[in-house]
Image: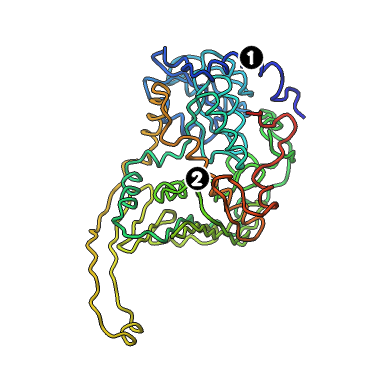
Amino acid sequence: MISDPLSRRGFVGGSAALAALAAMGVPSASAANDKVRLALIGAGSRGNQLLGSFLPRADVDFVAVVDVDDKHATETAEAIKRAKGHDVKTARDYRSVLDDPNVDAVVIATPDHWHALPAIHAVMAGKDVYVEKPVAHNVAEGQAMIRAARKYNKVMAVGTQQRSSTNFQQAVETVRSGKLGKVFWVQTWNFENISPVGIGRPADTNPPAHVDYDRWLGPAPARPFNPNRFHLLFRWFFDYAGGMMSDWGVHLNDIVLWALDAKGPLSVYTSGGIFTSDDNRDTPDTMQVVYEFPGCTLTYSMRKGNGLKYNGHDYGILFCGTEGSLMLDRSGHEIIPDKVILPYGIKLAQGDRPLRSIDLKAEQVKAKDDGIPAHVANFLDCLKSRERPTCDIEIAHRSTNTCHLGNIAYRVGRRLHWDETTETFKNDSEANALLAREARKGYELPKI
Protein backbone atom coordinates (compact mmCIF):
# COMPACT_ATOMS: atom_id res chain seq x y z
CA MET A 1 0.00 0.00 0.00
CA ILE A 2 1.13 3.56 -0.57
CA SER A 3 2.07 5.78 2.34
CA ASP A 4 0.80 9.04 0.85
CA PRO A 5 -2.53 8.41 -0.95
CA LEU A 6 -3.57 10.80 -3.69
CA SER A 7 -6.44 12.06 -1.60
CA ARG A 8 -4.14 13.35 1.13
CA ARG A 9 -5.05 16.70 2.65
CA GLY A 10 -1.83 18.40 1.60
CA PHE A 11 -2.46 18.00 -2.12
CA VAL A 12 -6.06 19.17 -1.94
CA GLY A 13 -5.25 22.12 0.28
CA GLY A 14 -2.19 23.18 -1.68
CA SER A 15 -4.17 23.17 -4.93
CA ALA A 16 -7.36 24.82 -3.72
CA ALA A 17 -6.40 28.42 -4.49
CA LEU A 18 -5.11 27.59 -7.97
CA ALA A 19 -8.17 25.50 -8.69
CA ALA A 20 -10.46 28.36 -7.72
CA LEU A 21 -8.63 30.72 -10.08
CA ALA A 22 -8.77 28.14 -12.87
CA ALA A 23 -12.50 27.69 -12.42
CA MET A 24 -12.98 31.42 -12.92
CA GLY A 25 -11.08 31.27 -16.20
CA VAL A 26 -7.94 33.07 -15.01
CA PRO A 27 -5.22 32.26 -17.58
CA SER A 28 -2.10 30.33 -16.69
CA ALA A 29 1.12 32.06 -15.73
CA SER A 30 2.33 31.39 -19.27
CA ALA A 31 0.37 34.41 -20.47
CA ALA A 32 2.73 36.67 -18.58
CA ASN A 33 5.98 34.96 -19.57
CA ASP A 34 7.94 34.73 -22.79
CA LYS A 35 8.31 30.98 -22.42
CA VAL A 36 5.81 28.31 -21.49
CA ARG A 37 7.28 26.41 -18.55
CA LEU A 38 6.46 22.73 -18.80
CA ALA A 39 6.77 19.66 -16.63
CA LEU A 40 7.14 16.28 -18.31
CA ILE A 41 5.26 13.52 -16.51
CA GLY A 42 6.45 10.18 -17.85
CA ALA A 43 9.99 10.22 -19.23
CA GLY A 44 10.13 6.92 -21.05
CA SER A 45 10.18 6.25 -24.76
CA ARG A 46 7.16 8.35 -25.76
CA GLY A 47 8.00 11.08 -23.26
CA ASN A 48 11.38 11.60 -24.88
CA GLN A 49 9.89 11.52 -28.36
CA LEU A 50 7.60 14.36 -27.33
CA LEU A 51 10.50 16.14 -25.70
CA GLY A 52 12.21 16.12 -29.07
CA SER A 53 9.22 17.98 -30.54
CA PHE A 54 8.73 20.50 -27.73
CA LEU A 55 12.29 21.23 -26.64
CA PRO A 56 13.71 22.82 -29.83
CA ARG A 57 11.10 25.57 -29.67
CA ALA A 58 12.32 28.93 -28.37
CA ASP A 59 9.00 29.58 -26.63
CA VAL A 60 9.21 26.44 -24.48
CA ASP A 61 11.22 25.40 -21.46
CA PHE A 62 11.07 22.29 -19.31
CA VAL A 63 11.56 22.95 -15.63
CA ALA A 64 10.66 19.54 -14.17
CA VAL A 65 10.67 15.84 -15.05
CA VAL A 66 8.56 13.30 -13.20
CA ASP A 67 8.96 9.54 -13.46
CA VAL A 68 8.72 6.63 -11.02
CA ASP A 69 11.89 5.30 -12.69
CA ASP A 70 14.79 7.38 -11.35
CA LYS A 71 16.98 6.50 -14.35
CA HIS A 72 14.38 7.81 -16.78
CA ALA A 73 13.95 11.01 -14.80
CA THR A 74 17.69 11.64 -14.37
CA GLU A 75 18.64 10.89 -17.96
CA THR A 76 15.85 13.08 -19.33
CA ALA A 77 16.69 15.94 -16.98
CA GLU A 78 20.31 15.77 -18.13
CA ALA A 79 19.20 15.90 -21.76
CA ILE A 80 17.16 19.03 -21.04
CA LYS A 81 20.10 20.61 -19.23
CA ARG A 82 22.35 19.98 -22.23
CA ALA A 83 19.78 21.59 -24.52
CA LYS A 84 18.73 24.52 -22.33
CA GLY A 85 21.70 25.04 -20.02
CA HIS A 86 19.96 24.85 -16.66
CA ASP A 87 19.21 22.29 -13.98
CA VAL A 88 15.85 20.56 -14.02
CA LYS A 89 13.87 19.39 -11.01
CA THR A 90 13.16 15.66 -10.87
CA ALA A 91 10.57 13.78 -8.83
CA ARG A 92 8.80 10.46 -8.56
CA ASP A 93 5.50 12.06 -7.54
CA TYR A 94 3.86 14.41 -10.05
CA ARG A 95 1.96 16.23 -7.33
CA SER A 96 5.06 18.15 -6.31
CA VAL A 97 5.21 19.89 -9.70
CA LEU A 98 1.50 20.69 -9.65
CA ASP A 99 2.05 22.78 -6.53
CA ASP A 100 4.93 24.62 -8.23
CA PRO A 101 3.96 28.11 -9.52
CA ASN A 102 6.88 27.92 -11.96
CA VAL A 103 5.04 25.22 -13.94
CA ASP A 104 2.47 26.48 -16.44
CA ALA A 105 1.44 23.21 -18.08
CA VAL A 106 2.23 19.51 -18.07
CA VAL A 107 2.99 17.01 -20.82
CA ILE A 108 1.81 13.54 -19.80
CA ALA A 109 3.38 10.52 -21.51
CA THR A 110 2.81 7.84 -18.89
CA PRO A 111 1.31 4.38 -19.52
CA ASP A 112 -2.41 4.50 -20.33
CA HIS A 113 -3.58 3.67 -16.80
CA TRP A 114 -1.75 6.77 -15.54
CA HIS A 115 -3.29 9.32 -17.93
CA ALA A 116 -6.45 10.28 -16.07
CA LEU A 117 -5.20 11.03 -12.56
CA PRO A 118 -2.33 13.44 -13.37
CA ALA A 119 -4.42 15.15 -16.09
CA ILE A 120 -7.33 15.73 -13.71
CA HIS A 121 -5.14 16.81 -10.80
CA ALA A 122 -3.20 19.14 -13.13
CA VAL A 123 -6.27 21.11 -14.21
CA MET A 124 -7.47 21.20 -10.60
CA ALA A 125 -4.12 22.82 -9.78
CA GLY A 126 -4.46 25.40 -12.55
CA LYS A 127 -2.24 23.76 -15.15
CA ASP A 128 -3.02 23.13 -18.80
CA VAL A 129 -2.44 19.63 -20.13
CA TYR A 130 -1.08 17.80 -23.16
CA VAL A 131 -1.77 14.09 -22.62
CA GLU A 132 -0.85 11.17 -24.82
CA LYS A 133 -3.33 8.85 -26.47
CA PRO A 134 -5.34 6.79 -25.80
CA VAL A 135 -7.14 9.21 -23.51
CA ALA A 136 -7.61 6.83 -20.59
CA HIS A 137 -7.72 3.25 -19.42
CA ASN A 138 -11.53 3.13 -19.55
CA VAL A 139 -14.58 5.17 -20.53
CA ALA A 140 -15.29 6.47 -17.03
CA GLU A 141 -11.79 7.91 -16.72
CA GLY A 142 -12.17 9.75 -20.02
CA GLN A 143 -15.51 11.19 -18.91
CA ALA A 144 -13.90 12.44 -15.70
CA MET A 145 -11.11 14.11 -17.69
CA ILE A 146 -13.65 16.00 -19.80
CA ARG A 147 -15.56 17.14 -16.71
CA ALA A 148 -12.36 18.37 -15.09
CA ALA A 149 -11.16 20.26 -18.17
CA ARG A 150 -14.51 22.00 -18.52
CA LYS A 151 -15.04 22.74 -14.83
CA TYR A 152 -11.63 24.34 -14.40
CA ASN A 153 -11.60 25.94 -17.86
CA LYS A 154 -8.22 24.51 -18.83
CA VAL A 155 -6.76 23.36 -22.14
CA MET A 156 -6.53 19.58 -22.36
CA ALA A 157 -5.03 18.48 -25.67
CA VAL A 158 -4.47 14.86 -26.67
CA GLY A 159 -1.63 13.44 -28.75
CA THR A 160 -3.62 12.11 -31.70
CA GLN A 161 -1.40 14.26 -33.87
CA GLN A 162 -2.65 13.01 -37.24
CA ARG A 163 -5.45 15.59 -36.95
CA SER A 164 -2.79 18.27 -37.38
CA SER A 165 -1.24 16.68 -40.47
CA THR A 166 -2.10 18.30 -43.81
CA ASN A 167 -2.02 14.82 -45.32
CA PHE A 168 -4.85 13.60 -43.08
CA GLN A 169 -6.70 16.91 -43.29
CA GLN A 170 -6.77 16.78 -47.09
CA ALA A 171 -7.81 13.13 -47.07
CA VAL A 172 -10.68 13.78 -44.67
CA GLU A 173 -11.82 16.74 -46.76
CA THR A 174 -11.89 14.49 -49.83
CA VAL A 175 -14.11 11.98 -48.04
CA ARG A 176 -16.43 14.64 -46.63
CA SER A 177 -16.65 16.51 -49.95
CA GLY A 178 -18.45 13.62 -51.62
CA LYS A 179 -15.77 13.07 -54.26
CA LEU A 180 -15.66 9.39 -53.43
CA GLY A 181 -19.44 9.14 -53.77
CA LYS A 182 -21.32 7.46 -50.96
CA VAL A 183 -18.73 6.10 -48.52
CA PHE A 184 -20.24 2.91 -47.17
CA TRP A 185 -17.26 0.77 -46.14
CA VAL A 186 -14.05 1.65 -44.27
CA GLN A 187 -11.21 -0.67 -43.32
CA THR A 188 -8.47 0.03 -40.76
CA TRP A 189 -5.69 -2.45 -39.97
CA ASN A 190 -2.37 -3.34 -38.31
CA PHE A 191 -0.46 -6.38 -39.57
CA GLU A 192 2.91 -7.83 -38.53
CA ASN A 193 4.41 -11.21 -37.71
CA ILE A 194 6.00 -11.69 -34.29
CA SER A 195 5.02 -15.36 -33.92
CA PRO A 196 5.57 -17.65 -32.17
CA VAL A 197 7.55 -16.02 -29.35
CA GLY A 198 5.70 -12.70 -29.19
CA ILE A 199 6.79 -10.90 -26.03
CA GLY A 200 7.86 -14.18 -24.40
CA ARG A 201 7.25 -15.46 -20.90
CA PRO A 202 9.82 -13.99 -18.51
CA ALA A 203 9.52 -14.98 -14.87
CA ASP A 204 8.23 -12.65 -12.18
CA THR A 205 11.03 -10.97 -10.26
CA ASN A 206 11.75 -8.11 -7.89
CA PRO A 207 11.30 -4.62 -9.35
CA PRO A 208 14.48 -2.62 -10.01
CA ALA A 209 15.73 -0.68 -7.00
CA HIS A 210 15.55 2.60 -8.92
CA VAL A 211 11.80 2.18 -9.57
CA ASP A 212 8.84 2.93 -7.29
CA TYR A 213 6.86 -0.03 -8.56
CA ASP A 214 3.90 0.46 -6.22
CA ARG A 215 3.44 3.96 -7.58
CA TRP A 216 3.89 2.66 -11.14
CA LEU A 217 0.96 0.29 -10.56
CA GLY A 218 -1.12 3.21 -9.26
CA PRO A 219 -4.83 2.53 -9.83
CA ALA A 220 -4.15 -0.88 -11.42
CA PRO A 221 -4.45 -4.11 -9.41
CA ALA A 222 -1.46 -5.21 -7.34
CA ARG A 223 0.61 -7.73 -9.30
CA PRO A 224 4.10 -9.20 -8.92
CA PHE A 225 6.68 -7.36 -11.00
CA ASN A 226 7.20 -8.84 -14.44
CA PRO A 227 9.37 -7.25 -17.16
CA ASN A 228 6.57 -7.68 -19.69
CA ARG A 229 4.18 -5.71 -17.50
CA PHE A 230 6.54 -2.76 -17.33
CA HIS A 231 8.22 -0.33 -19.73
CA LEU A 232 6.96 -0.41 -23.33
CA LEU A 233 5.29 -3.84 -23.07
CA PHE A 234 2.65 -2.85 -20.51
CA ARG A 235 0.19 -2.18 -23.33
CA TRP A 236 -0.36 -5.91 -23.94
CA PHE A 237 -2.16 -6.25 -20.59
CA PHE A 238 -5.70 -5.13 -19.83
CA ASP A 239 -4.63 -3.96 -16.34
CA TYR A 240 -2.81 -1.02 -17.93
CA ALA A 241 -3.97 -0.58 -21.52
CA GLY A 242 -5.95 -2.14 -24.37
CA GLY A 243 -3.44 -3.89 -26.60
CA MET A 244 -2.99 -3.00 -30.25
CA MET A 245 -6.66 -1.98 -30.42
CA SER A 246 -5.95 1.00 -28.14
CA ASP A 247 -2.33 1.62 -29.04
CA TRP A 248 -2.82 1.99 -32.81
CA GLY A 249 -6.53 1.57 -33.35
CA VAL A 250 -7.16 4.92 -31.68
CA HIS A 251 -5.10 6.73 -34.34
CA LEU A 252 -6.88 4.99 -37.19
CA ASN A 253 -10.42 5.15 -35.83
CA ASP A 254 -9.94 8.79 -34.86
CA ILE A 255 -9.56 9.72 -38.52
CA VAL A 256 -12.57 7.61 -39.47
CA LEU A 257 -14.84 9.32 -36.92
CA TRP A 258 -13.63 12.68 -38.22
CA ALA A 259 -14.26 11.77 -41.86
CA LEU A 260 -17.70 10.29 -41.12
CA ASP A 261 -18.60 13.19 -38.81
CA ALA A 262 -19.56 10.60 -36.21
CA LYS A 263 -19.36 10.46 -32.42
CA GLY A 264 -19.53 6.71 -32.16
CA PRO A 265 -20.90 3.53 -33.71
CA LEU A 266 -24.36 2.08 -33.38
CA SER A 267 -22.99 -1.36 -32.57
CA VAL A 268 -19.76 -3.32 -32.30
CA TYR A 269 -18.81 -6.99 -32.57
CA THR A 270 -15.34 -8.48 -32.09
CA SER A 271 -13.86 -11.89 -32.77
CA GLY A 272 -10.30 -12.96 -32.13
CA GLY A 273 -7.98 -14.25 -29.44
CA ILE A 274 -4.39 -15.19 -28.64
CA PHE A 275 -3.80 -17.50 -31.58
CA THR A 276 -0.15 -17.16 -32.66
CA SER A 277 1.87 -15.81 -29.71
CA ASP A 278 3.21 -18.10 -27.00
CA ASP A 279 3.65 -15.36 -24.43
CA ASN A 280 2.04 -14.01 -21.25
CA ARG A 281 -0.07 -11.23 -22.77
CA ASP A 282 -3.79 -11.14 -22.03
CA THR A 283 -4.82 -8.84 -24.89
CA PRO A 284 -5.47 -10.58 -28.23
CA ASP A 285 -2.89 -11.00 -30.97
CA THR A 286 -5.65 -11.43 -33.55
CA MET A 287 -8.78 -9.27 -33.84
CA GLN A 288 -11.55 -8.51 -36.26
CA VAL A 289 -13.78 -5.69 -35.03
CA VAL A 290 -16.91 -4.68 -36.94
CA TYR A 291 -18.52 -1.32 -36.18
CA GLU A 292 -21.90 -0.35 -37.56
CA PHE A 293 -22.52 3.31 -38.41
CA PRO A 294 -25.58 4.69 -40.18
CA GLY A 295 -25.10 3.59 -43.81
CA CYS A 296 -21.49 2.55 -43.27
CA THR A 297 -19.48 -0.36 -41.88
CA LEU A 298 -16.04 0.10 -40.30
CA THR A 299 -13.78 -2.88 -39.70
CA TYR A 300 -10.56 -2.90 -37.68
CA SER A 301 -8.31 -5.88 -38.42
CA MET A 302 -5.23 -6.78 -36.39
CA ARG A 303 -2.94 -9.75 -36.56
CA LYS A 304 0.45 -10.44 -35.01
CA GLY A 305 1.02 -13.78 -36.71
CA ASN A 306 1.15 -12.74 -40.37
CA GLY A 307 2.64 -9.63 -41.91
CA LEU A 308 1.21 -9.73 -45.42
CA LYS A 309 0.56 -6.13 -46.32
CA TYR A 310 -2.92 -4.98 -47.30
CA ASN A 311 -2.67 -3.20 -50.66
CA GLY A 312 1.00 -2.62 -49.90
CA HIS A 313 0.50 -1.19 -46.40
CA ASP A 314 1.11 -2.91 -43.05
CA TYR A 315 -1.24 -0.37 -41.43
CA GLY A 316 -3.64 2.23 -42.73
CA ILE A 317 -7.15 3.35 -43.57
CA LEU A 318 -9.12 2.56 -46.72
CA PHE A 319 -12.29 4.53 -47.47
CA CYS A 320 -14.48 2.94 -50.15
CA GLY A 321 -17.17 4.94 -51.95
CA THR A 322 -19.33 4.45 -55.00
CA GLU A 323 -17.03 6.67 -57.11
CA GLY A 324 -13.68 5.49 -55.81
CA SER A 325 -11.43 4.73 -52.86
CA LEU A 326 -8.91 6.58 -50.73
CA MET A 327 -5.91 4.79 -49.24
CA LEU A 328 -4.32 6.64 -46.31
CA ASP A 329 -1.42 6.31 -43.90
CA ARG A 330 1.31 8.59 -42.53
CA SER A 331 3.34 8.39 -45.74
CA GLY A 332 0.53 10.03 -47.73
CA HIS A 333 -2.74 9.19 -49.41
CA GLU A 334 -3.96 8.01 -52.78
CA ILE A 335 -7.29 8.58 -54.53
CA ILE A 336 -8.22 5.60 -56.71
CA PRO A 337 -11.13 6.02 -59.17
CA ASP A 338 -13.50 3.07 -59.47
CA LYS A 339 -15.19 1.54 -62.53
CA VAL A 340 -18.81 0.49 -62.93
CA ILE A 341 -19.28 -2.95 -64.47
CA LEU A 342 -22.17 -5.11 -65.65
CA PRO A 343 -21.71 -8.60 -64.17
CA TYR A 344 -22.27 -11.62 -66.41
CA GLY A 345 -25.35 -12.82 -64.50
CA ILE A 346 -27.13 -9.47 -64.57
CA LYS A 347 -26.39 -9.07 -68.29
CA LEU A 348 -27.84 -12.49 -69.09
CA ALA A 349 -30.95 -11.89 -66.97
CA GLN A 350 -31.66 -8.27 -67.89
CA GLY A 351 -29.79 -7.63 -71.13
CA ASP A 352 -27.14 -5.09 -71.94
CA ARG A 353 -27.38 -1.51 -70.71
CA PRO A 354 -25.19 1.61 -70.78
CA LEU A 355 -22.89 2.06 -67.82
CA ARG A 356 -22.28 5.36 -66.07
CA SER A 357 -18.80 6.82 -66.25
CA ILE A 358 -16.81 7.89 -63.20
CA ASP A 359 -15.07 11.25 -63.47
CA LEU A 360 -13.01 11.03 -60.26
CA LYS A 361 -9.34 11.75 -60.98
CA ALA A 362 -6.52 9.62 -59.60
CA GLU A 363 -4.26 11.51 -57.23
CA GLN A 364 -1.28 10.76 -54.98
CA VAL A 365 -0.23 13.00 -52.09
CA LYS A 366 3.02 12.56 -50.17
CA ALA A 367 2.92 13.50 -46.49
CA LYS A 368 5.27 16.11 -45.07
CA ASP A 369 5.15 14.69 -41.55
CA ASP A 370 2.76 12.93 -39.17
CA GLY A 371 1.46 16.22 -37.77
CA ILE A 372 3.49 16.45 -34.55
CA PRO A 373 5.09 19.89 -35.20
CA ALA A 374 1.73 21.50 -35.98
CA HIS A 375 0.05 19.61 -33.12
CA VAL A 376 2.56 20.93 -30.60
CA ALA A 377 2.27 24.44 -32.04
CA ASN A 378 -1.52 24.29 -31.78
CA PHE A 379 -1.35 23.28 -28.11
CA LEU A 380 1.01 26.13 -27.29
CA ASP A 381 -1.10 28.62 -29.24
CA CYS A 382 -4.17 27.53 -27.28
CA LEU A 383 -2.42 28.28 -24.00
CA LYS A 384 -2.51 31.92 -25.09
CA SER A 385 -5.79 32.09 -27.00
CA ARG A 386 -7.66 29.81 -24.53
CA GLU A 387 -9.36 28.16 -27.50
CA ARG A 388 -9.91 24.42 -27.57
CA PRO A 389 -7.10 22.53 -29.31
CA THR A 390 -7.27 20.66 -32.60
CA CYS A 391 -7.63 17.41 -30.68
CA ASP A 392 -9.49 18.49 -27.59
CA ILE A 393 -10.09 15.95 -24.83
CA GLU A 394 -13.71 15.45 -25.87
CA ILE A 395 -12.79 14.61 -29.47
CA ALA A 396 -10.08 12.17 -28.42
CA HIS A 397 -12.32 10.63 -25.77
CA ARG A 398 -14.81 9.59 -28.45
CA SER A 399 -12.04 8.11 -30.60
CA THR A 400 -10.63 6.24 -27.59
CA ASN A 401 -14.11 4.94 -26.84
CA THR A 402 -14.17 3.05 -30.14
CA CYS A 403 -11.17 1.09 -28.86
CA HIS A 404 -12.74 0.44 -25.46
CA LEU A 405 -15.88 -0.77 -27.25
CA GLY A 406 -13.91 -3.15 -29.45
CA ASN A 407 -12.12 -4.62 -26.45
CA ILE A 408 -15.28 -4.91 -24.35
CA ALA A 409 -17.08 -6.72 -27.19
CA TYR A 410 -14.11 -9.10 -27.35
CA ARG A 411 -14.24 -9.74 -23.60
CA VAL A 412 -17.98 -10.42 -23.42
CA GLY A 413 -18.06 -12.28 -26.73
CA ARG A 414 -21.16 -10.78 -28.34
CA ARG A 415 -22.46 -7.89 -30.39
CA LEU A 416 -23.05 -4.77 -28.33
CA HIS A 417 -25.33 -1.82 -29.05
CA TRP A 418 -23.95 1.59 -28.11
CA ASP A 419 -25.79 4.73 -27.02
CA GLU A 420 -23.48 7.63 -27.85
CA THR A 421 -25.55 10.09 -25.81
CA THR A 422 -25.36 8.23 -22.51
CA GLU A 423 -22.11 6.43 -23.40
CA THR A 424 -23.53 3.13 -22.23
CA PHE A 425 -24.44 -0.16 -23.83
CA LYS A 426 -28.12 -0.82 -24.33
CA ASN A 427 -29.56 -3.49 -22.04
CA ASP A 428 -26.23 -5.09 -21.15
CA SER A 429 -25.17 -4.78 -17.52
CA GLU A 430 -22.14 -7.07 -17.97
CA ALA A 431 -20.70 -4.91 -20.74
CA ASN A 432 -21.54 -1.68 -18.88
CA ALA A 433 -19.59 -2.92 -15.86
CA LEU A 434 -16.46 -2.84 -18.04
CA LEU A 435 -16.83 0.87 -18.80
CA ALA A 436 -15.10 1.60 -15.49
CA ARG A 437 -13.09 -0.23 -12.86
CA GLU A 438 -12.53 0.02 -9.14
CA ALA A 439 -9.18 1.71 -8.59
CA ARG A 440 -6.72 0.54 -6.00
CA LYS A 441 -7.15 2.28 -2.67
CA GLY A 442 -5.48 5.68 -2.64
CA TYR A 443 -5.67 6.10 -6.42
CA GLU A 444 -9.36 6.75 -6.87
CA LEU A 445 -10.63 9.37 -9.33
CA PRO A 446 -11.49 12.65 -7.60
CA LYS A 447 -15.10 13.71 -7.68
CA ILE A 448 -15.58 16.41 -10.31
- Choose between 416 and 251: the one closer to the eye: 416
Q: Residue at x 50, y 58 (%)?
A: 292
Task: Find numbered disc 2 in the image and state the secondary structure of the residue it sits on.
Answer: helix
Q: Earlier in the sequence, mark 1 or mark 2?
A: 1
The dot on residue 265 is none
User: Furthest residue to the right?
Assistant: 1
Q: Which residue is mark 1?
A: 14
Which of the 4 image quarters holds residue 179? bottom left
Q: Position of residue 330 (x, y in %)?
A: 38, 47
Task: Find numbered disc 1 in the image and state the secondary structure of the residue it sits on.
Answer: helix
The kind of residue on which mark 2 rests is Ser
Query: In the rendered image of this protein, does residue 155 appear above or below residue 336?
Result: above
Query: In the rendered image of this protein, does residue 392 appear above or below residue 380?
Result: below
User: Furthest residue to the bottom?
Assistant: 348
Q: Which residue is mark 2?
A: 399
Which of the 4 image quarters holds residue 43? top right
Q: Position of residue 49 (x, y in %)?
A: 46, 34
Q: Residue at x 60, y 57 (%)?
A: 416
Q: Residue at x 62, y 39 (%)?
A: 140
The kind of residue on which mark 1 rests is Gly
Q: Position of residue 76 (x, y in %)?
A: 52, 26
Query: In the rendered image of this protein, does residue 146 appear above or below residue 227?
Result: above
Dot 2, crowdedness within 10 Å: few (<14), some or many (≥20)?
many
Dot 1, crowdedness within 10 Å: few (<14), some or many (≥20)?
some
- Choose between 268 and 280: the one closer to the eye: 268
